[in-house]
Structures are given as C-alpha cells and as structure tokens.
Image (spheres, grey):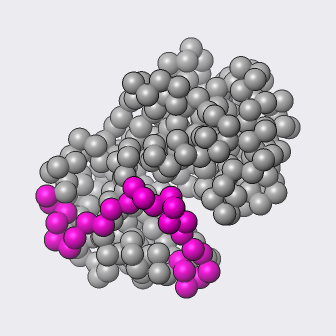
C-alpha cells in the first residue's frame, strides 16, 4: 500500500491519558516523516492546541483542526483553509441550548476557546470522576459572561469553527443531540465519558468532517484517500477511518469504531499509535 499521508487524532490516540506525546509515538512519527510521509494532526481541538502537540511530537507537517473546519500548514502558517460555522448557525445553537437547563455552547476559533457556565460545571463534574484538566493548556480559554453570546458571535462570526454543547444531565445532552441532528444543517459527533455519566456533542456545519478535510488535503498534495493511513478512536474519527486507504482504530475505541476500521491497534496507554505506524508504515 502506497501510504503518503499519516493522519493522527490527538485525544485517545497520539496522546496519553495525561495529555502528552510519548517517546515511542514521537519516534514513530519522525521515522515516518523521514520516509517522506506527510504527518497530519487530525483533531477536534483547535490550532493552538495542535501546534503545541506537534512540537511535542518532534514536528509535524499539517493540522486538520476543529473536526475538519480548518486545514493549516505547520510549515507555512500562511496556508490555511477554513469553513466556519457562520453567525446564523451559531445563534441557532445558542437558542437551542437556552431550552435546556444548565446548557450553553462552547465555541472554538483557531486561537481560543470561549465557554459559558456549563463548561465550568463540566470541569467540576470531570474532577468528581477523578479527571483533572491541565490548566497550563487552557491559557487560551475565555469565559463569556452570561447573556453576552449575541455580542460575542457578532464579533467572531467569521472565525468560529466548531461548537461543543454541554449539560450536566446526560439525558439533556441526548435530547440536544436529537434537536441538532433534526435541524439538518449540522454535522454532529457525540462523546461519552466515564461510562456515559458525562456527555457532550461536537457540532460543525453540514459537510465539515475530518474525512472530507483529509480528502481536500490529499488532493492538494497530489494524492488521494487510498494513500492515507488514518488512526483514531472516537465518533469524530469515523469519517476518516472509513475513507482512508487504511483506517486504524485504537484499542480503546468503542466497539462501533473498531468495527468500522480496517485494522485495530493497541490502546493509547500502550502506545497504540506508535505500534500502528511501526506495523503498517515503517
């Protein structure tokens, strides 16, 4: 198989559970790059986070961020392709959240994340389950005061790439997901933590996915999806796992993600991304 692009998700894939790139993964990525393979971060996070983890990995070539809403060269910052949500869709999400107690959106731009009260509660809920956020990574996170979403959206209408919807009640998140999906103008990727005790929904404009962004990047690089090896673990990785010439699921991925993949590697605690690169690429 002629693999020219290596696409790696971050959380649950390239990263350990302590939000870092292991030595084994860093070495594997750099060996792939020495073979001429383009190393691509493909994540729901934004460019600010992606650049930080690319450095931890010893350098990478491209970042597909916010679930495919932005394609960015990590070698030439002037090369950026973006598909923002747009003002009207952002306002729709704020309005939808207002119908659920303790819910509001969290909006991603390339450089920052803007959140409301529900995200602060989400952090407290995670802490109650033993998961602590690394606040050194959160210096680009900004709290939006209550009732200020309209002004924020107007000011950032060209730069908001993705939203995450939170609520402390998992059943409320399920109902929000149904409402967003029924609207027909969005791509959604549900996420569960701690066995479903906490849930959230990642939301992009319709047609924006990691798989589609990878296809755009592959065409720019003079190849196509059969030349891509994609590794991931979550619902937002399904499009690229299905579309890639070699789609690899992490061992820690849910059963439906593993079933959709061409192959399954070890989990992220056992350097599964490195093992996949070593087995199928090096």
Q: Which residues are magenta?
A: 126-151
**Rendered location of residue 241, percent (x, y):** 63, 42
Pick out the residue farthest to the bottom: 128
- Residue 20: tell me if it is visible: yes
Q: Is residue 5 above or below residue 203?
A: above
- Where residue 4 sits: x, y (%)? 68, 23
Q: Is residue 272 above or below residue 229?
A: below
Q: Nearer the viewer, residue 145 or 195?
A: 145
Q: Give left or right: position of 266 versus 89.
A: right
Q: Quadrant of residue 47?
A: top left
User: In the image, residue 255 lies at what x, y percent?
Assistant: 70, 61
Which of the two residues, 208 or 47, is positioned nearer the viewer here? Answer: 47
Q: Can residue 260 be seen in this snapshot?
A: no
Residue at 46 percent across and 32 percent down: it is 72
Q: Residue furthest top?
A: 222
Does the magenta run of residues contain 176?
Answer: no
The picture places residue 6, in percent across and down from the top left corner, at 67, 33
């Amino acid at each position: 198989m002629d693999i020219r692009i290596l696409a790696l998700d971050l959380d649950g894939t390239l990263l350990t559970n302590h939000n870092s790139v292991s030595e084994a993964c860093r070495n594997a990525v750099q060996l792939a790059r020495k073979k001429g393979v383009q190393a691509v971060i493909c994540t729901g996070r934004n460019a600010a986070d992606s650049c930080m983890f690319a450095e931890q990995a010893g350098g990478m070539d491209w970042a597909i961020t916010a679930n495919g809403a932005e394609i960015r060269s990590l070698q030439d910052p002037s090369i950026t392709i973006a598909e923002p949500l747009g003002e009207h869709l952002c306002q729709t999400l704020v309005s939808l959240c207002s119908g659920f107690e303790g819910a509001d959106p969290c909006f991603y731009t390339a450089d920052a994340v803007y959140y409301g009260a529900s995200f602060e509660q989400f952090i407290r809920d995670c802490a109650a389950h033993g998961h602590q956020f690394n606040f050194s990574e959160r210096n680009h996170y900004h709290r939006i005061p209550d009732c200020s979403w309209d002004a924020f959206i107007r000011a950032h209408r060209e730069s908001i790439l993705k939203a995450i919807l939170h609520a402390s009640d998992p059943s409320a998140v399920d109902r929000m997901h149904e409402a967003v999906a029924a609207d027909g103008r969005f791509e959604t990727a549900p996420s569960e933590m701690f066995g479903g005790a906490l849930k959230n929904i990642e939301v992009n404009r319709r047609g924006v996915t990691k798989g589609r962004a990878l296809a755009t990047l592959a065409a720019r690089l003079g190849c196509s999806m059969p030349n891509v090896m994609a590794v991931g673990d979550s619902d937002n990785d399904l499009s690229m796992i299905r579309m890639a010439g070699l789609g690899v699921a992490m061992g820690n991925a849910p059963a439906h993600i593993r079933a959709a993949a061409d192959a399954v590697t070890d989990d992220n605690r056992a350097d599964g991304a490195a093992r996949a690169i070593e087995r199928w690429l090096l």
